[in-house]
């Protein structure tokens, strides 16, 4: 999505609260406020449950779920000062919407993210903070580039629109939930999957 404007780049490991705080401080210093937070970091470790690897589980939970708590906690003081804001999380159709073998770590973390979204939406509504989540389906990213031709074809057979999504499909949905057009929406999960989950 090319909407003009400018941005700053602040490399941040969302598993570390000090780095989150530094990134938010840099944002406020550059733009005078922090009114929208989008958690789009993800860690995927595939594997069957009998091959459970504690480090893979910890990485998925830390990046996909624990970071969401830290980001919310660090965002709230800034948004309270403004009288409101938007928290937007990126979950997935994998796990919360569709069960897939070999995705237990990822699915558990993304399902937890939806539960977190709904819970803190209740907590923060009275402060004017809207909390929602996106649930992308199969999007054309580095993760899906790993699919071989047979896997890709099998996946497309389950998507009524007949294609993988692209970054703009997710960006447009995020812009909607982060903007004024969603002023009466909180605690919701917007599925962006080409109709795969109906």
Image (tube, grey):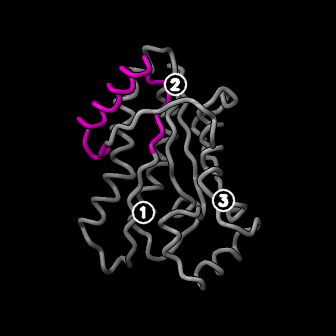
**Residue that carries the numbered disc 2 in the rendered image:** 85
**Residue that carries the numbered disc 1 in the rendered image:** 106
Measured as percent of width and height from the top left, residue 148 is found at 54, 82
Which span is picked out in magenta? Answer: 12-39
Measured as percent of width and height from the top left, residue 35 is found at 49, 24
Nearest the eye: 93 or 142 = 142
Nearest the eye: 16 or 6 = 6
Label 3 Cα neighbours within 10 Å, binned few <14 / some 14-19 / many ≥20: many
**In the image, is residue 35 part of the stretch drawn in magenta?**
yes
Q: Compared to 96, does 89 lie above or below? A: above
The answer to which quarter of the image holds residue 187 is: top right
CA–CA distance between discs 1 and 3? 17 Å
Q: Which mark is residue 188?
A: none
Measured as percent of width and height from the top left, residue 62 is found at 31, 52
Local SS, label 3: loop
Indicate the quadrant containing the N terminus: top left, top right, bottom left or bottom right.
Answer: top right
**In the image, is residue 2 part of the stretch drawn in magenta?**
no
Local SS, label 2: strand
**Residue that carries the numbered disc 3 in the rendered image:** 193
Residue 3 placement, left or right of 21: right
């Amino acid at each position: 999505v090319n909407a003009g404007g400018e941005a700053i780049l602040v490399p941040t490991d969302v598993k570390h609260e000090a780095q989150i705080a530094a990134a938010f401080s840099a944002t406020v210093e550059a733009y005078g406020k922090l009114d929208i937070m989008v958690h789009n970091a993800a860690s995927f470790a595939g594997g069957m449950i009998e091959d459970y690897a504690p480090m893979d589980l910890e990485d998925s939970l830390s990046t996909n779920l624990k970071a969401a708590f830290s980001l919310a906690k660090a965002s709230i003081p800034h948004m309270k000062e403004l009288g409101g804001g938007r928290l937007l999380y990126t979950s997935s159709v994998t796990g919360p919407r569709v069960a897939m073998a070999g995705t237990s770590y990822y699915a558990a973390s993304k399902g937890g993210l939806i539960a977190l979204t709904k819970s803190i939406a209740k907590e923060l509504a009275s402060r004017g903070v809207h909390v929602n989540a996106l649930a992308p389906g199969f999007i054309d990213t580095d993760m899906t580039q790993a699919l071989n031709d047979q896997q890709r074809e099998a996946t497309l057979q389950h998507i009524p629109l007949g294609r993988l999504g692209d970054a703009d499909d997710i960006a447009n949905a995020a812009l909607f939930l982060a903007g004024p057009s969603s002023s009466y929406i909180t605690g919701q999960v917007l599925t962006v999957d080409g109709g795969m989950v109906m």
